[in-house]
Amino acid sequence: MPSITHMASQIKRMKNWNLIDFVGSFSNARGDTEKLLKQIGAWEEFGSTGWGVNGTEAIFGTTKTCHATGSETLYDKFFVSKDIERRVEKRYAVDYGREEIANALRRNATSKADKARD
C-alpha cells in the first residue's frame, strides 16, 4: 500500500459500499458534483457559490480542473513506458473490478434512464 493516502486504492479507502448509490466521474467533476449536491439538498448551501479565487464560483466552476498536488504535471515524468502504464493499471484494477462499484454505477445509470423517461 502506498504511503501517500491520496494514491491509495479507492476500494481500500471506502467502507460500506452497499450504502453508495452515486458514483461520479472526475472528468465531469462539475456536473456530477452539482447533481449529487442537488439530490441531497445541499447545492445552494455548499456548491453553488463560495469557491474559486474570489469565493464567487460554484464548486469546480473553473474551466480548468487542477489537482491540489499538481499531479497533472507529473504524468510524462512517471509514465515513460507502456510497461509502467500496465503496472499502474494492474495496481488499480481492483477499483474497477469490484462488484460494489459496478452496482453503484448500475444504480446511477438506472436512475438516469428513469429520469430521462419522465
Image (cartoon, rainbow, N blue to C red):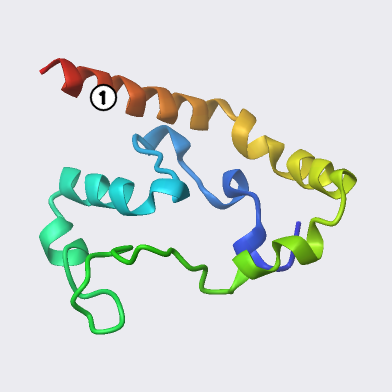
Q: Is residue 104 left or right of residue 54?
A: right
Q: Residue at x 13, y 50 (%)?
A: 41
Q: Quadrant of residue 72?
A: bottom right
What amino acid type is highlighted by mark number 1?
Ser
Residue at the bottom extreme of this rendering: 54
* Quarter of the image where the N terminus is located: bottom right
The relative height of residue 35 versus residue 75 in the rendered view (above or below) is: above
Image coordinates for residue 113, horizontal then vertical, percent:
26, 19
The relative height of residue 12 versus residue 43 in the rendered view (above or below) is: above
Q: Quadrant of residue 95?
A: top right
Nearer-the-camera pick, 2 or 56: 56
Q: Residue at x 83, y 44 (%)?
A: 87
Q: Residue at x 70, y 68 (%)?
A: 74
Q: Residue at x 50, y 32 (%)?
A: 101
Q: Is residue 76 left or right of residue 14?
A: right
Image coordinates for residue 79, horizontal then vertical, percent:
79, 56
Q: Residues within 10 Å of mark 1 (few under 14, many from 20)?
A: few
* Quarter of the image where the C terminus is located: top left
Total number of numbered discs in the rendering: 1
Mark 1, secondary structure of its residue: helix
Q: Which residue is mark 1?
A: 111
Q: Is residue 97 left or right of residue 27?
A: right
Q: Is residue 61 left or right of residue 74?
A: left
Q: Quadrant of residue 18?
A: top left
Residue at the top extreme of this rendering: 117
